[in-house]
Amino acid sequence: MSEQDLEKIYKDIRKRVHKTYEKRKEYAIHATAFIVSMVVLWLFIFNPGNFGGRGFFEFIATLISGVWAIGFAVHSVDFLMTELRERAIKREIERTRLFNGVPKLKNNDMNAYVGMRLSEDGELLEFDYDESDESSRSAST
């Protein structure tokens, strides 16, 4: 693989991680703004010293709250579905890697792989490649 290919892969991964982070940040900002605004709006409306007749202002506050709540609900569903899709993609990539015989990473450490092997009684066991390499090296010395 050439240096340009590696650079392109790096940029694609960085762009994907940045996009995920930005979506999470936008959702957190939206949730915070929604909660704080609703609390302030309704505390202002129900403060007895603000208005004599509150009918019109309660209607406006209810309208604003309802429209914003619908928008926030749609944003929440979009955010959660995106997160679920990313998890499903990661899970499928890992499943495909294992199916193709590529060992999975141990604790996301690029140098520590976990493999699968059959025990003497036919049971499927995980083992660390690093530990098996060390034991084979020590056995050969």
Image (cartoon, rainbow, N blue to C red):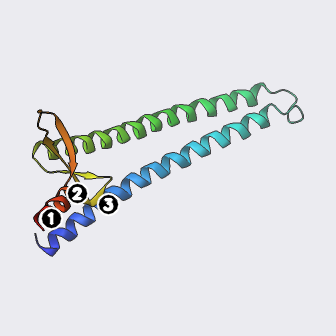
Disc sitting over residue 15 in the figure = 3
**Residue type, mark 2 in image:** Glu
**Residue type, mark 1 in image:** Arg
Cα separation, mark 2 vs mark 1, equals 10 Å
Cα separation, mark 2 vs mark 3, equals 35 Å
Most extreme residue toward the bottom is 3
Across and down, in percent, residue 16 comes to 31, 56
Label 3 crowding class (10 Å Cα cut-off): few <14, some 14-19, many 20+? few
Tell me whether the residue at label 2 lies in contact with that at label 1, contact meaning CB atoms closer than 8 angstroms: no
Across and down, in percent, residue 81 comes to 37, 36
Residue at horizontal 63%, vertical 30%?
63
Label 1 crowding class (10 Å Cα cut-off): few <14, some 14-19, many 20+? few
Q: Is residue 111 above or below residue 106?
A: below
Q: Is residue 61 above or below residue 5?
A: above
Residue at horizontal 86%, vertical 36%?
50
Is label 3 in a helix, a strand or a loop? Answer: helix
Towards the viewer: 54 or 119: 119
Towards the viewer: 76 or 49: 76
Across and down, in percent, residue 124 comes to 16, 36
Residue at horizontal 52%, vertical 36%?
72
The mark lying in front, picked from 1 and 3, is 1
**Residue 87, image quadrant:** top left
Q: Which sits earlier in the primary sequence, circle 2 or circle 1?
A: 2
**Residue 80, image quadrant:** top left
Is label 2 in a helix, a strand or a loop? Answer: helix
Label 2 crowding class (10 Å Cα cut-off): few <14, some 14-19, many 20+? few
Quadrant occupied by the C terminus: bottom left
Q: Which sits earlier in the primary sequence, circle 2 or circle 3?
A: 3
Disc sitting over residue 137 in the figure = 1
Disc sitting over residue 57 in the figure = none
